[in-house]
């Protein structure tokens, strides 16, 4: 097993780890096409705008809607975003067998989102980013291993 697993694009190995991967989640009784749809919508308290994001046909469209600053972000966003991401990623891997098997098959390898423009969720342009999504995936892997 490789010491480090990198993922990012939908054409890469381990693309299932991406929030853009086509594995829907039910959160709070509502179905979301991807983790990305859910995460972007949770940036806002406005229920109409959340629904617009939920109905976006593609995750890149959901992300674009979530990047707007025409509407204010919820005031607690910086405090809750990591938990929102963790909850949605956990749900994805609890719900879908194929991605769960892929994740569990990574053993104890480090998982890194190779996102060159994102030094928070990914490794950033210089590889020194926080890799929060990779960290969450490894936490979910540990939890799922303990549960099996």
Image (cartoon, helix red, strand yellow):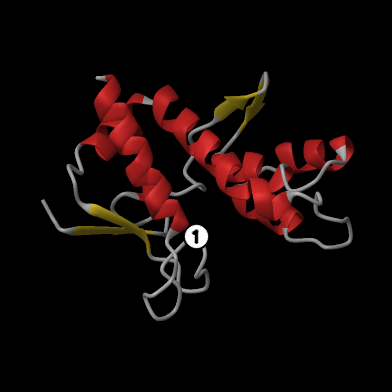
The residue identified by callout 1 is 121
Label 1: element kind: loop
In this rendering, is residue 136 above or below 87? below
- The reply, left or right, for residue 37 in relation to residue 9 is right
Does residue 61 appear anywhere in the picture?
no
Query: Residue at position x 38%, y 44% from top?
Result: 137
Query: Residue at position x 56%, y 40% from top?
Result: 35
Q: How many marks?
A: 1
In this rendering, is residue 24 above or below 107? above
- The reply, left or right, for residue 45 in relation to residue 92 is right
> Looking at this view, is 97 or 39 the one in front?
39
Query: Residue at position x 80%, y 49% from top?
Result: 74
Does residue 103 appear anywhere in the picture?
yes
Q: Residue furthest bottom?
A: 126
Image quarter of the C terminus:
top left
- The reply, left or right, for residue 101 in relation to residue 132 is left
Residue 94: image location, x then y, percent: 41, 25
Residue 85: image location, x then y, percent: 55, 43
Residue 77: image location, x then y, percent: 72, 51
Residue 88: image location, x then y, percent: 54, 35
In this rendering, is residue 133 above or below 47? below
Query: Residue at position x 46%, y 56% from top?
Result: 132
Instruction: Find residue 48 and report its image quarter.
Output: top right
The crowd level at tag 1 (other Cα within 10 Å; few <14, some 14-19, many 20+) is many
- The reply, left or right, for residue 127 in relation to residue 122 is left
């Amino acid at each position: 097993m490789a010491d480090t697993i990198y993922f990012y694009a939908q054409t890469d190995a381990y693309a299932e780890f991406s929030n853009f991967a086509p594995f829907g989640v039910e959160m709070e009784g509502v179905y979301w096409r991807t983790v990305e749809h859910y995460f972007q919508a949770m940036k806002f308290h406005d229920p109409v705008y959340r629904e617009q994001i939920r109905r976006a046909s593609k995750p890149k469209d959901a992300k674009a809607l979530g990047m707007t600053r025409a509407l204010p972000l919820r005031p607690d966003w910086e405090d809750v975003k990591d938990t929102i991401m963790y909850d949605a990623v956990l749900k994805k891997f609890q719900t879908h067998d194929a991605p769960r098997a892929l994740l569990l098959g990574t053993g104890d390898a480090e998982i890194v989102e190779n996102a060159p423009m994102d030094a928070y969720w990914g490794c950033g342009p210089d590889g020194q980013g926080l890799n929060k999504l990779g960290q969450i995936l490894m936490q979910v892997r540990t939890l799922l291993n303990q549960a099996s």
